[in-house]
Image (spheres, grey):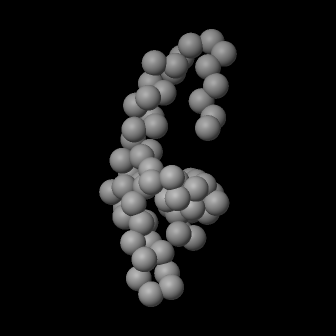
Amino acid sequence: MSKVSSRFGISRRSAYRLAASGKIVTIKIGRSRFIVTESIQYYIQRSITFRQPNVGTPGADLRS
């Protein structure tokens, strides 16, 4: 989970929140928890797709 922030640009805390809410899939191996890469990529792509209509409009806030 700690590599998520550097690779995908989200905080570790956000990654844990997304996992807890079921928006991304994680796998627990021993005491470590890993994010399924396709899961986070799908979540990010879906977020970008939902925001597409706002791109280029005055006053559009693209922050989470």
On the question of residue 8 being in view, the answer is no
Q: Residue furthest front?
A: 21
How many numbered callouts?
0
Answer above or below: position of 44 versus 32. above
Residue shown at 46% from the left, 37% from the top: 47
Camera-nearest residue between 54 and 21: 21
- Locate residue 58: give its quadrant: top right
In this image, 39 relative to 15: left or right? left
Above or below, 12 against 58 in this view is: below
Could you say where residue 10 lies in the image, as x and y percent from the top left? Answer: 58, 54
* Residue 21 at x, y percent in the picture: 51, 52
Q: Residue at x 42, y 66 (%)?
A: 26
At x 44%, y 50%, the residue is 23
Is residue 37 something one can see in this rendering? yes
Q: Residue furthest bottom?
A: 30
Q: Is residue 27 left or right of residue 58?
A: left
Q: Say if 49 sits above or below 40 in the image.
A: above
Give the x, y percent position of residue 42: 36, 47
Left or right? Give the position of 62 relative to 29: right
Outermost residue, top side: 58
* Above or below, comparing residue 52 to residue 20 in the picture: above
From the image, which quarter does the C terminus lie in?
Answer: top right
Q: Give the residue drawn at x 42%, y 46%.
A: 43
Q: Nearer the viewer, residue 1 or 3?
A: 1
In percent of width and height, residue 61 lies at 64, 25
